[in-house]
Protein backbone atom coordinates (compact mmCIF):
# COMPACT_ATOMS: atom_id res chain seq x y z
CA UNK A 1 0.00 0.00 0.00
CA UNK A 2 1.29 3.43 -0.88
CA UNK A 3 0.03 5.88 1.68
CA UNK A 4 -0.77 9.34 0.35
CA UNK A 5 -2.36 11.18 3.27
CA UNK A 6 -2.31 11.19 7.06
CA UNK A 7 -5.21 12.79 8.88
CA UNK A 8 -5.29 13.64 12.57
CA UNK A 9 -7.66 14.25 15.39
CA UNK A 10 -6.94 17.62 17.03
CA UNK A 11 -7.76 17.58 20.79
CA UNK A 12 -5.41 15.38 22.81
CA UNK A 13 -3.73 14.13 19.64
CA UNK A 14 -1.82 17.11 18.19
CA UNK A 15 -3.16 19.71 20.62
CA UNK A 16 -2.61 19.31 24.38
CA UNK A 17 -6.26 19.90 25.23
CA UNK A 18 -6.38 18.02 28.51
CA UNK A 19 -3.47 19.82 30.17
CA UNK A 20 -4.78 23.21 28.99
CA UNK A 21 -8.23 22.43 30.39
CA UNK A 22 -6.80 21.24 33.69
CA UNK A 23 -4.72 24.37 34.18
CA UNK A 24 -7.56 26.64 33.09
CA UNK A 25 -10.38 25.17 35.15
CA UNK A 26 -8.53 25.42 38.45
CA UNK A 27 -7.31 28.97 37.73
CA UNK A 28 -10.78 30.04 36.60
CA UNK A 29 -12.66 28.51 39.53
CA UNK A 30 -10.41 30.37 41.96
CA UNK A 31 -11.40 33.67 40.30
CA UNK A 32 -15.09 32.88 40.92
CA UNK A 33 -14.45 32.84 44.66
CA UNK A 34 -14.57 29.09 45.13
CA UNK A 35 -11.89 27.77 47.48
CA UNK A 36 -10.20 25.01 45.48
CA UNK A 37 -8.80 22.76 48.17
CA UNK A 38 -8.35 19.71 46.00
CA UNK A 39 -7.41 20.66 42.42
CA UNK A 40 -7.46 17.03 41.27
CA UNK A 41 -11.05 16.66 42.45
CA UNK A 42 -12.03 19.72 40.39
CA UNK A 43 -10.17 18.42 37.33
CA UNK A 44 -11.83 15.00 37.59
CA UNK A 45 -15.25 16.55 38.11
CA UNK A 46 -14.78 18.85 35.10
CA UNK A 47 -13.66 15.90 32.94
CA UNK A 48 -16.76 13.90 33.92
CA UNK A 49 -19.07 16.84 33.27
CA UNK A 50 -17.44 17.48 29.89
CA UNK A 51 -17.68 13.83 28.92
CA UNK A 52 -21.37 13.76 29.84
CA UNK A 53 -22.58 16.97 28.20
CA UNK A 54 -20.24 16.98 25.21
CA UNK A 55 -21.54 13.57 24.22
CA UNK A 56 -25.09 14.87 24.56
CA UNK A 57 -24.09 17.67 22.14
CA UNK A 58 -22.52 15.18 19.70
CA UNK A 59 -25.71 13.10 19.92
CA UNK A 60 -27.79 16.17 19.06
CA UNK A 61 -29.47 16.45 22.48
CA UNK A 62 -27.90 19.83 23.30
CA UNK A 63 -26.72 22.71 21.15
CA UNK A 64 -23.07 23.74 21.37
CA UNK A 65 -24.04 26.71 23.54
CA UNK A 66 -26.38 24.51 25.57
CA UNK A 67 -23.65 22.03 26.49
CA UNK A 68 -21.40 24.90 27.58
CA UNK A 69 -24.10 26.35 29.83
CA UNK A 70 -24.90 22.93 31.29
CA UNK A 71 -21.22 22.23 32.04
CA UNK A 72 -20.70 25.58 33.79
CA UNK A 73 -23.90 25.22 35.80
CA UNK A 74 -23.12 21.65 36.88
CA UNK A 75 -19.57 22.46 37.97
CA UNK A 76 -20.64 25.49 39.99
CA UNK A 77 -23.50 23.75 41.78
CA UNK A 78 -21.27 20.71 42.45
CA UNK A 79 -18.78 23.14 44.02
CA UNK A 80 -21.46 24.54 46.33
CA UNK A 81 -22.29 27.73 44.41
CA UNK A 82 -25.86 28.86 43.64
CA UNK A 83 -27.25 27.89 40.19
CA UNK A 84 -26.06 30.02 37.24
CA UNK A 85 -28.44 31.79 34.90
CA UNK A 86 -27.72 31.41 31.18
CA UNK A 87 -26.24 34.92 31.09
CA UNK A 88 -24.01 34.12 34.06
CA UNK A 89 -22.96 30.85 32.43
CA UNK A 90 -22.00 32.74 29.26
CA UNK A 91 -19.86 35.21 31.25
CA UNK A 92 -18.34 32.29 33.12
CA UNK A 93 -17.34 30.72 29.80
CA UNK A 94 -15.81 33.92 28.45
CA UNK A 95 -13.54 34.12 31.50
CA UNK A 96 -12.79 30.39 31.45
CA UNK A 97 -11.84 30.49 27.76
CA UNK A 98 -9.35 33.27 28.44
CA UNK A 99 -7.59 30.98 30.91
CA UNK A 100 -7.86 28.06 28.47
CA UNK A 101 -6.35 30.05 25.59
CA UNK A 102 -3.46 31.15 27.81
CA UNK A 103 -2.67 27.46 28.35
CA UNK A 104 -2.80 26.37 24.69
CA UNK A 105 0.10 24.36 23.32
CA UNK A 106 0.83 21.41 21.08
CA UNK A 107 2.10 18.09 22.33
CA UNK A 108 5.89 18.08 22.05
CA UNK A 109 5.84 15.24 19.53
CA UNK A 110 3.32 16.90 17.17
CA UNK A 111 5.53 19.08 14.97
CA UNK A 112 8.34 16.54 14.49
CA UNK A 113 5.72 14.01 13.38
CA UNK A 114 4.09 16.42 10.90
CA UNK A 115 7.52 17.47 9.59
CA UNK A 116 8.54 13.85 8.96
CA UNK A 117 5.29 13.05 7.16
CA UNK A 118 5.50 16.19 5.01
CA UNK A 119 9.13 15.39 4.15
CA UNK A 120 7.93 11.94 3.02
CA UNK A 121 5.43 13.58 0.65
CA UNK A 122 2.30 12.89 2.69
CA UNK A 123 -0.66 15.23 2.55
CA UNK A 124 -2.01 16.22 5.95
CA UNK A 125 -5.43 16.95 7.39
CA UNK A 126 -7.65 17.25 10.45
CA UNK A 127 -10.96 15.59 11.26
CA UNK A 128 -12.39 16.90 14.52
CA UNK A 129 -15.63 16.53 16.44
CA UNK A 130 -16.38 20.16 17.26
CA UNK A 131 -17.21 23.55 15.83
CA UNK A 132 -15.22 24.64 12.79
CA UNK A 133 -14.67 28.24 13.98
CA UNK A 134 -13.39 27.23 17.40
CA UNK A 135 -11.13 24.48 16.08
CA UNK A 136 -9.81 26.79 13.33
CA UNK A 137 -8.91 29.38 15.99
CA UNK A 138 -6.80 26.71 17.70
CA UNK A 139 -5.16 25.61 14.44
CA UNK A 140 -4.33 29.23 13.60
CA UNK A 141 -2.89 29.91 17.06
CA UNK A 142 -0.74 26.77 16.82
CA UNK A 143 0.39 27.77 13.29
CA UNK A 144 -1.03 24.55 11.88
CA UNK A 145 -3.68 25.85 9.47
CA UNK A 146 -1.30 26.43 6.59
CA UNK A 147 0.12 22.92 6.96
CA UNK A 148 -3.24 21.22 6.57
CA UNK A 149 -4.63 20.28 3.16
CA UNK A 150 -8.07 19.68 4.64
CA UNK A 151 -9.86 20.49 7.90
CA UNK A 152 -13.21 18.80 8.52
CA UNK A 153 -15.21 19.68 11.66
CA UNK A 154 -18.35 17.75 12.62
CA UNK A 155 -20.21 20.95 13.48
CA UNK A 156 -19.72 22.09 9.89
CA UNK A 157 -20.54 18.89 8.03
CA UNK A 158 -23.30 17.45 10.23
CA UNK A 159 -21.77 14.03 10.92
CA UNK A 160 -19.54 13.12 13.85
CA UNK A 161 -16.80 10.53 14.30
CA UNK A 162 -17.05 7.53 14.43
CA UNK A 163 -19.57 7.82 11.55
CA UNK A 164 -17.71 6.58 8.48
CA UNK A 165 -19.11 9.41 6.37
CA UNK A 166 -16.93 12.04 8.06
CA UNK A 167 -13.78 10.05 7.19
CA UNK A 168 -15.01 9.44 3.64
CA UNK A 169 -15.81 13.13 3.22
CA UNK A 170 -12.32 14.20 4.31
CA UNK A 171 -10.73 11.73 1.87
CA UNK A 172 -13.02 12.93 -0.91
CA UNK A 173 -12.03 16.56 -0.25
CA UNK A 174 -8.38 15.51 -0.41
CA UNK A 175 -8.92 13.49 -3.57
CA UNK A 176 -7.36 10.45 -1.88
CA UNK A 177 -8.98 7.00 -1.67
CA UNK A 178 -9.65 5.92 1.96
CA UNK A 179 -7.40 2.91 1.39
CA UNK A 180 -4.49 5.30 0.80
CA UNK A 181 -5.08 7.36 3.93
CA UNK A 182 -4.45 6.90 7.64
CA UNK A 183 -6.13 8.54 10.61
CA UNK A 184 -4.48 9.09 13.98
CA UNK A 185 -6.47 9.83 17.15
CA UNK A 186 -6.49 9.32 20.91
CA UNK A 187 -9.90 7.63 21.14
CA UNK A 188 -9.91 4.00 20.14
CA UNK A 189 -13.55 3.66 19.11
CA UNK A 190 -14.30 7.21 17.94
CA UNK A 191 -11.05 7.74 16.08
CA UNK A 192 -9.09 4.64 15.18
CA UNK A 193 -11.91 2.10 14.83
CA UNK A 194 -14.19 4.62 13.13
CA UNK A 195 -11.50 5.42 10.57
CA UNK A 196 -10.65 1.76 10.04
CA UNK A 197 -14.31 0.91 9.43
CA UNK A 198 -14.30 3.59 6.70
CA UNK A 199 -11.34 1.92 4.99
CA UNK A 200 -8.48 4.08 6.30
CA UNK A 201 -5.60 2.76 8.37
CA UNK A 202 -6.74 3.53 11.91
CA UNK A 203 -4.01 4.52 14.34
CA UNK A 204 -4.82 4.66 18.06
CA UNK A 205 -2.62 7.07 19.97
CA UNK A 206 -2.59 5.52 23.44
CA UNK A 207 -0.53 8.07 25.37
CA UNK A 208 -1.77 6.94 28.77
CA UNK A 209 -1.62 3.17 28.26
CA UNK A 210 -5.31 2.67 28.77
CA UNK A 211 -6.43 -0.79 29.83
CA UNK A 212 -8.28 -2.60 27.07
CA UNK A 213 -10.65 -5.53 27.54
CA UNK A 214 -10.06 -8.51 25.29
CA UNK A 215 -13.28 -8.07 23.31
CA UNK A 216 -12.39 -4.51 22.32
CA UNK A 217 -8.80 -5.49 21.61
CA UNK A 218 -10.02 -8.27 19.31
CA UNK A 219 -12.42 -5.88 17.56
CA UNK A 220 -9.64 -3.34 17.02
CA UNK A 221 -7.28 -6.01 15.76
CA UNK A 222 -9.87 -7.31 13.32
CA UNK A 223 -10.09 -3.81 11.87
CA UNK A 224 -6.31 -3.64 11.58
CA UNK A 225 -5.98 -0.80 14.09
CA UNK A 226 -2.38 0.14 14.83
CA UNK A 227 -1.56 1.17 18.41
CA UNK A 228 1.19 3.71 19.14
CA UNK A 229 2.18 5.36 22.42
CA UNK A 230 3.43 8.64 20.95
CA UNK A 231 3.32 10.59 17.70
CA UNK A 232 7.07 10.00 17.30
CA UNK A 233 6.22 6.40 16.32
CA UNK A 234 3.71 7.38 13.64
CA UNK A 235 5.97 8.18 10.64
CA UNK A 236 7.93 4.91 10.91
CA UNK A 237 4.87 2.80 11.58
CA UNK A 238 2.94 4.23 8.64
CA UNK A 239 5.67 4.79 6.07
CA UNK A 240 7.11 1.30 6.30
CA UNK A 241 3.74 -0.31 5.61
MG1 LIG B 1 -9.12 13.60 20.74
Image (cartoon, grey):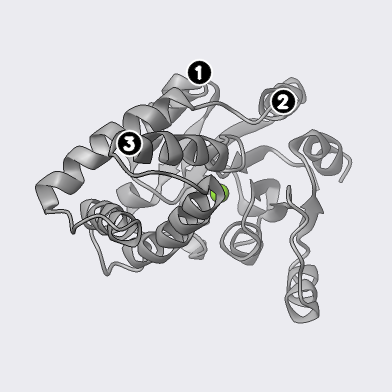
Where is residue 228 shown, x and y percent of the image? 80, 48
Question: Considering the numbered disc 2 on the image, is that residue within a helix, a strand or a loop?
Answer: loop
The structure residue drawn at horizontal position 27% and vertical position 32%, both measured from the top left corner, is: 95
Few, some or many residues within 10 Å of mark 3 (<14, 14–19, 20+): many
Residue 14 placement: quadrant: top right
Left or right of 15: which side holds 228?
Answer: right
The structure residue drawn at horizontal position 35% and vertical position 56%, both measured from the top left corner, is: 79
Left or right of 59: which side holds 189?
Answer: right
- In the picture as drawn, the residue positioned furthest to the right comes out as 240
Residue identified by numbered label 1: 143
Residue 96 — which label?
3
| Marks 3 and 1, the one that precedes in the sequence | 3
Left or right of 32: which side holds 45?
Answer: right
Left or right of 48: which side holds 80?
Answer: left
Q: Is residue 104 above or below residue 67?
A: above
Q: Nearer the viewer, mark 3 or mark 2?
A: 3
Residue identified by numbered label 2: 121
Where is residue 158 shown, x and y percent of the image? 32, 57
Where is residue 170 shown, x and y percent of the image? 49, 46
Q: Is residue 103 above or below residue 221?
A: above
Where is residue 164 shown, x and y percent of the image? 52, 63
Q: CA distance from mark 3 to mark 2?
A: 40 Å
Q: Nearer the viewer, mark 1 or mark 2?
A: 1
Q: Is residue 168 above or below residue 234?
A: below
Question: Looking at this view, is 23 or 126 the one in front?
Answer: 23
Few, some or many residues within 10 Å of mark 1 (<14, 14–19, 20+): few
Few, some or many residues within 10 Å of mark 2 (<14, 14–19, 20+): few
| Marks 3 and 2, the one that precedes in the sequence | 3
The structure residue drawn at horizontal position 80% and vertical position 76%, both measured from the top left corner, is: 218
The structure residue drawn at horizontal position 80% and vertical position 42%, both measured from the top left corner, is: 238
Question: Considering the numbered disc 1 on the image, is that residue within a helix, a strand or a loop?
Answer: loop
Q: CA distance from mark 3 to mark 1?
A: 23 Å
Amino acid sequence: MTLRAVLFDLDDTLFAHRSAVEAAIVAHLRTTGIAVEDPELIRARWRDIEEHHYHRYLAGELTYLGQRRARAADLMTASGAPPLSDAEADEWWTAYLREYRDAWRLHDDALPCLDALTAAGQRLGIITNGELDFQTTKLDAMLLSSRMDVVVASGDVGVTKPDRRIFELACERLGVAPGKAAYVGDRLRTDAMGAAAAGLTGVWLDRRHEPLDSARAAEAEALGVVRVEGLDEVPDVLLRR
